Image: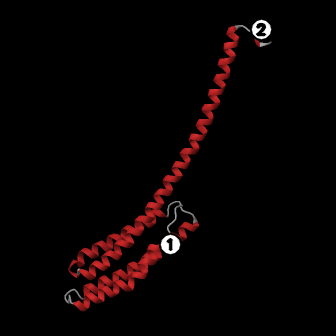
Amino acid sequence: MSPANMSISKKLLVIVAFISIFLVANSVIGFVFLNQVGGAVVSVDETANQVRLGARMNQDAVELNRAEYRLAAEAHVLDEIRAVVAESEASFRDRYERALDGVGAQQRKLLDDAKGAFDIYAEKVDETVSLAQSAEAAATEEMRNRLVGRGEENRPFASQLCALPLPPS
């Protein structure tokens, strides 16, 4: 049957059928690609969360370093420094545990390296706080210099910790 012999209503019906098929195919393709984009957005969001956790872990290390130098400058704030050190250590450990969720073996190794470096540095800072506590009554220039010296001795540990890459998953 040629189109010339078809009635107008059948011609219109064929045109509507072609347009309907095109619209259904277009909708299916759009739905599939939107699902793929949605999956990519979730992946980007997870990566952003990992990067954010890594940056905040780095901030915890910087906070320890700042507290150590502040202790040398202002030994009378020992209790405040102790609280800052304890908070930074707890915060780092909490973020470390959260960062472990859903990471691969390579990222886990980097996180473990960062935790090891942080533990070493935190121990050094705790030793500096103990030194300041033992000399709290003797707030002398010599003691301040010893505390500054401890900060300088511990600086490579802080630098090493801050230089560790914490890649996204």
Q: Farthest front residue?
A: 4
For the residues marked 2 and 1, what is the alpha-carbon distance in whole angstroms? 79 Å
| Residue at x 34%, y 86% (from the top left corner) | 150
| Image quadrant where one finds the N terminus | top right
* Residue 58 location (% of width, % of height): 41, 69
**Comes first in the chain, label 2 or label 1:** 2
Measuring 27% from the left and 85% from the top, which residue is drawn there? 132
**Residue 143 x/y as whole percent:** 25, 90
Q: Is residue 28 above or below residue 19?
A: below
Residue position for label 1 = 112
Residue 5 badge: 2
Answer few, some or many: residues within 10 Å of disc 1's Cα (few below 14, many 20 plus, some between 14 and 19). Answer: some
What is the basis of the colouring in this image? Answer: secondary structure
Q: Secondary structure at mark 2?
A: helix
32 w.r.t. 147: above or below? above
Q: Which mark is residue 125?
A: none
| Relative depth, front residue between 12 and 120 | 12
